[in-house]
Image: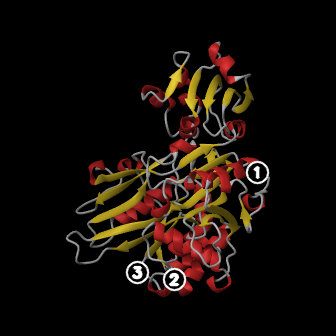
Amino acid sequence: MMRPTDRPDGPTDGFTDERTAEILPGLDLHRFRSSGRPAAEDPRGARMIAAVERGFYEAVPTGAALDQVLSLYGEDRRTYVGVYETGTDPETTEPVGTFASFSKHLQTGAGREIEGLLISDVTVRSTHRRRGILRAMMRAELDRAATAGIPVAALSASEATIYRRFGFGVATTRRTVEVDTGGEVALAGPVSGSMRMVEPKDLRDLGPALYDRAHRQSPGAVGRTAAYSVIETDTWMSKNDGKGTGVLAAVHHDDGGTPRGYVTYTFTGWDQKVPTVKVGVLVASTAASYRAIWDYLVHLDLIRKVEWGFASDDRLLENLLVDPRRVKTTGHADQLWLRVLDVPACLTGRPYHRDGELVLEVTDPLGYAAGIWRLTVEGGTAGVVRVGDAKTELETATADLSLEVADLSSVYLGGVSAEMLRQAGRITEHRPGAAAELTALLSQDRPVFCMTGF
């Protein structure tokens, strides 16, 4: 199997899309690979990062902080697409549109995975909106991924109404929670092993190893970006010159002394009315480790509240506690958006826990996934074949279900119910009960959750 970094991905350095003159009059589209070199040696990459940060209203890193970001992006092997005013030099000019992509594996369940194109750093300068810049960048990179045989694209969205028109659908969600830890707090289940406080820098090697172990068990998880190596070790150069910002860390070891999980957290200060810690990164490779980490957090001395912005939406946290009302959800958000590019590769690249057969008519405005597809599962193994011409088959009602590619992308991992989307009017059922059958066929033996941002 090819590793993501070995995938053929077409020209990257200095590439200009030949269609840009027609699609984006007065603008040029350039693609290049992150070099990982310092800003002094890579002014083009430095100006790309500056444009991204301005697009998200963030401070632009400089000096050692900028060099660190460039190095991390080089480790990810990010490919950047920038849109520039025609005639300007990317070495000396900031782009008016930015788009980054890189390959990581998407866990599809039961330890199986497929390659995904992760999309990030998407911005369009406010002075250049409504000129087709986002569409040109997105189409160029989806074309590249499809040509390279990458079956799915993924992103997280800052706005909820942008990406459906490109075929993306919400596949996983997350929530922000507050846990009341005042008074006597008890867990409902047993707690084993031991928690040991460590220096965040001690997670440099341990963190990636434990994350990899946990991520392989979680359908919906993707490989982490290189930035986590400085996030969880508290070595961001843009924050206190990399000397640390007060992040605390603890590691869970099982009864045999083997590390099984870890957590990072920060204290919000004594000026708060309720003494609070905020969880940064929480990784547990076993259920026992998850319980032990939360037993540790809810019993921190002097602390009366724990906040976490990356909790799963499955109520596992509530069920950990004898009193589930101590957990308060303060916000919900979509997390992982998926875009199926290759229907057979996606559907055969995930596990199944029951047999069945369905014919799906998929519409796709960009064409990648369009067609009528027969999905047959026997003995946990799926086969997918195209069934004739879409128009002909629809007229003879061959399809059991009709759905847009965005909705196929949502239900693909099993975290979103096809039956629910039918009731919402997004999926059309040609045979009664077919949507419920698809929901059952795509069900997982574990909750579907994306454990990381990108």
Residue 230: give x, y in percent of width and height.
54, 75
Horizontal side, residue 281 vs residue 9: left or right? left
Residue 52: give x, y in percent of width and height.
52, 68
Secondary structure category for the residue under label 1: loop
Which residue has dot 2 on it? 237
Which residue has dot 3 on it? 246
Q: CA distance from mark 1 to mark 3?
A: 44 Å
- Name the mark on residue 282: none
Mark 2 crowd level (few <14, some 14–19, many ≥20, 10 Å Cα): many
- Vertical placement of residue 445 versus 310, above or below: above
Horizontal side, residue 309 vs residue 156: left or right? left
Are dots 2 and 1 in contact, CB under 8 Å? no
Residue found 58% across the figure and 72% down from its top: 48
Horizontal side, residue 267 vs residue 111: left or right? left
Residue 186: give x, y in percent of width and height.
31, 56
Which residue has dot 1 on it? 148
Q: CA distance from mark 2 to mark 1?
A: 36 Å
